Amino acid sequence: MAGFLRDFKRFTSAKFRANLEATEPSVLKLFIDVQGSYRFWMETNAPKKIENPAFYFQKLNYIHENPVRKGYVSRPEH
């Protein structure tokens, strides 16, 4: 999964930069980091710490309901 995410970020960053250079060059400067590089994605994909029950149940519900919404299964328990 890490390799996929790395490649996805690299690919989309290059496409996004090319699109901005061609269509909105003045907006491109908003994505320059302190080293002078373009940064479109967060540095890390660190997981979020579950600090309260509401956050936990929000994520649990997403895990159960997302495959149903996508049509992969008909019921969350599947």
Image (cartoon, helix red, strand yellow):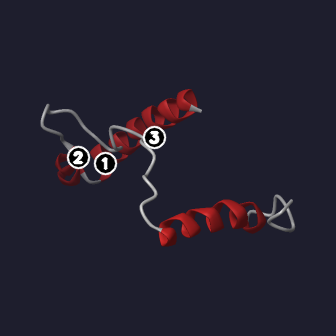
Which residue is disc 3 drawn over? Answer: 12
Residue 59 image-quadrant placement: bottom right
Furthest residue toward bottom:
54
Q: Earlier in the sequence, mark 1 or mark 2?
A: 1
Residue 20, labelled with which disc? 1
Q: Amino acid at mark 2?
A: Phe
Image point (32%, 44%), residue name:
40
Q: Label 1: how many residues lie within 10 Å, few (<14), some (14-19) or many (20+)?
A: some
Query: In this rendering, which labeled residue sits more in front, label 1 or label 3?
Result: 3
Q: In the structure shown, which secondary structural element does the residue marked by tag 2 occupy?
A: helix
Cα–Cα span, label 3 and label 2? 14 Å
Residue 37, labelled with which disc? none
- Residue 54 screen position, x and y as percent: 50, 72
- Contact between marks 1 and 2 (CB within 8 A): the answer is yes
Q: In the structure shown, which secondary structural element does the residue marked by tag 3 occupy?
A: helix
Furthest residue toward top:
3
Which residue is disc 2 drawn over? Answer: 31
